[in-house]
Image (cartoon, rainbow, N blue to C red):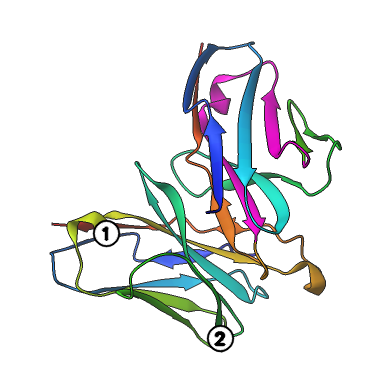
Amino acid sequence: KAGVTQTPRYLIKTRGQQVTLSCSPISGHRSVSWYQQTPGQGLQFLFEYFSETQRNKGNFPGRFSGRQFSNSRSEMNVSTLELGDSALYLCASSLAPGLGGTGELFFGEGSRLTVL
Amino acid sequence: EDKVVQSPLSLVVHEGDTVTLNCSYEVTNFRSLLWYKQEKKAPTFLFMLTSSGIEKKSGRLSSILDKKELFSILNITATQTGDSAVYLCAVEAGYNFNKFYFGSGTKLNVKP
């Protein structure tokens, strides 16, 4: 069974640009979450999608947005990049307990964004 | 404000030592607490705890949850260099599933 796949793995952007990151969850998982990981702040929750609907949202500015497609693949977008957006962006998928899962998060290897 | 605090932030031990990692939390509507191990890539799942006082074990690792005192511990006995990693504690909370609050992690370095 393939794991969570994130693309691209590494990217470099400059301030003011925008970026789109992609996440393909484990087959059958309908929930996809996004996290930002930085050395100072640890993992911070961005948002979670389930069946194409944003179900949960963290405390990030509106420059951070996401969406989920009917095949459960998800994208997140960051507009008007700032230096502080440099981070590892992790995607996680899960299968809800009510659907036969255990509720744990399965993580991808992340997209490392550097903003210059 | 919901928060998860891990201690210590970092730890250096020698092979064979036993370590205890701590995770305390203050959240609204607690659902579960999870432990993850992160080396240089994706965090990998260790344990999920939902009930107080029931120890979960996997080899040399074990964990327990205290929902009255709002904390969990992760024990690693007979540590090995391969245990060197960042250990993350995550608490699922709120009124919807899948909203997790992570601690900042404990960086464990096991020396030969």
Q: Is residue A113 above or below residue A71?
A: above
Given the image, what chain letter belongs to the residue carrying mark 2? A
Residue B55, position as x, y percentages in the image: 83, 34
Callout count: 2
**Could you tell whether A16 is left or right of A35 in the image?**
left
Q: Secondary structure at mark 1?
A: helix
The one of A65 and B69 positioned closer to us in this rendering? B69
Mark earlier in primary sequence (2, 1): 2
Name the residue at 19% across, 73% down.
A80
Q: Give the residues in magenta.
A: B67-93
Amino acid type, mark 2: Glu
Q: Is residue B109 left or right of residue B16?
A: left
Q: Is residue B79 in the magenta section?
A: yes
Residue at 24% x, 75% y is A79
Q: Residue at x 68, y 69 (%)?
A: B95
Q: Which residue is mark 1?
A: A85
Q: Kindly identify which residue carries mark 2.
A: A52
Q: Is residue A25 magenta?
A: no
